[in-house]
Image (spheres, grey):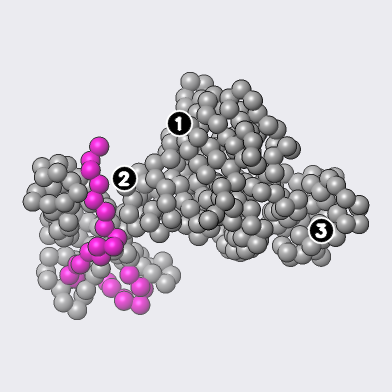
Amino acid sequence: MTDTMMTGRGLVKSHRGRRVLDTVDIDLKRGCITAILGPSGAGKSTLLRVMAGLEDLDSGEIAGSGQLLTNGQVIVPPEKRSVGLVFQDFALFPHLTALGNVMFGLRSGPAASRREIAMDRLAAVQMDDRADAYPHTLSGGEQQRVALARALAPEPEIVLLDEAFSGLDAHLRSELRDMAVRELKRSGAAVLVVTHDAEEALYMADELALMVDGAIIQSGTPSDVYLKPQSLSAAQLLGEVNIWAGRVANGVLESPFGTVNADQIDDGGEASLLIRPEGVMLDDAKPDGRFSVAEVHPLGATATVKVQALSGECWQARVPTSRRLKAGMLVSIELDPSLVSVVAEL
């Protein structure tokens, strides 16, 4: 069974009369990467900061390492918690070399031993050849590698990453993300990643939590949260989604693009059908005359296709670019049930 290394229960934090954290519960487990995904202002960074001990709570409790860490009255400071931190701005000490930055967190043992550990950590992130370089001579990606090595060097029980890759270009961000996942998993620490990037959250997380207005609105495995969003807000956080609102009748919800099962909603109730673009399957070999291709936008390996029903409604589909669909073509549509969710209208 996975060990829970840090827990938060009923976490409440307000700022200028607004609840930044609204009764949040969270568990960080050994060897597990938990990602918090949400828009700017959702409370993600505040949650990370209270878990780290950088901010206090209004109410609620955080516990870890067999002790109470924060309860709105008592707060154990960050240096007394077994926590490693990685921030978007790297936060390296400018007067120390890469090696000196990594050694900084190693407070005990002879200098030779600390140097050996620090060099091993730098080697793990492919920065041992820049050990004597100062931060201002390093690229953003190199600085972030050093920051990760510094966070992991003391072998903390918890590692917290706050938008750690958002300041990097797309190619470098992908490369560092791969490296970070490898090293974080190797460390065995419980990891919390906060991000506004859906792809990053889905790629890195073992457990994914969606956060809006200070509250966690859905959590689970990345695939479960992506495939079965429990609300429109949850669906939109993870990318494009087609929406159709209507009234349930005889256990089904009818849309211009197909009829889906909705027996979990009371007959007569208003509901929304949510389906990812890749769940709108197009067949140009057997067009039925009810749907036409309105637009095609290649995106590399896949293309986004806007398809129009006779009623004028348009949905987005995603197909391999090799399909070579063109505007004006007629198609038939089938909806992939694994990518369909029906949620009650609020």
Crowding at mark 2 (Cα within 10 Å: few <14, some 14-19, many 20+): some
Classify mark 2: helix, strand or loop.
loop
Judging depth in this view, the residue of 78 and 188 nearest the camera is 188
Q: The C terminus appears in which quarter of the rendering?
A: top left
Label of residue 297 in the image: none
The residue under the point 19% across, 67% down is 333
Q: Which residue is mark 3?
A: 117
Q: Position of residue 30 (x, y in %)?
A: 59, 53
Give the residues drawn in magenta, as a range: 319-346
Q: Residue 231 bears which disc, if any?
A: 2
Please determine whether, in this image, residue 224 is positioned above or below residue 27: below
In percent of width and height, residue 137 lies at 79, 54
Which of 164 and 34 lies nearest the eye of the viewer? Answer: 34
Q: CA distance from mark 1 to mark 2?
A: 18 Å
Residue at 86% across, 54% down = 114
Question: Which residue is pictured at 73% across the width and 64% down the height?
Answer: 124
Please report whichever mark, 1 or 2, sits nearer to the chain's N-terminal start: 1
Question: In the rendered image, is residue 13 in sight?
Answer: no
